[in-house]
Image (cartoon, rainbow, N blue to C red):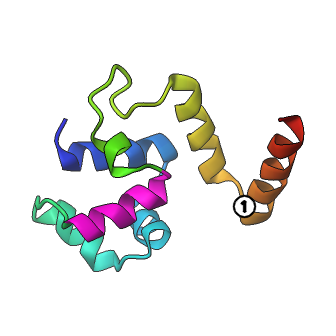
Amino acid sequence: MNTLERIHYHMKLRGWSEYRLAKEADLSQSTIANIFRRDTIPSIPTLECICKAFGLTLSQFFSDSEQEDGVTEDEHELLMIWSTLSGEQQQLMMNLIREMR
């Protein structure tokens, strides 16, 4: 899977549009659009922003493990659900998880 396919995969996993990815990665919408329209590989700093938005390290992003990105299917589902929560809901979930440890 090439870099653009991996970005698309993670966007689809989370149900994100290019606009949402730009917002979450704190990048301009034109930067994201250019990556896809011109079929270009993003720079390392841009890719780092994208990975941070996905909650992944560069290593996880490029991992060729069985799960393509180094996480289990349950973790994929958790990420997908997490990305749909509001900031307040995410904070409540974090508090619950911390209490469960």
Q: Position of residue 46 (x, y in %)?
A: 28, 69
Residue at (41%, 68%) from the top-left corner?
19
Which residue ends up furthest to the top in the rendered image?
66
Residue at (38%, 66%) from the top-left corner?
49
Q: Position of residue 84 (x, y in %)?
A: 64, 52
Q: Position of residue 9 (x, y in %)?
A: 34, 41
Front residue of 72/85: it is: 72
Residue at (84%, 54%) from the top-left corner?
92
Figure label count: 1
Q: Is residue 33 left or right of residue 37?
A: right
Q: What residue does disc 1 label?
A: 86
Say if the magenta span includes residue 65.
no
**On screen, residue 58 above or below 78:** below
Front residue of 18/48: it is: 48
Q: Is residue 70 left or right of residue 44?
A: right
Q: Which residues are magenta?
A: 44-55
Residue type at tag 1? Ser
Helix, strand or loop under label 1: loop
Say if the magenta span includes residue 51.
yes
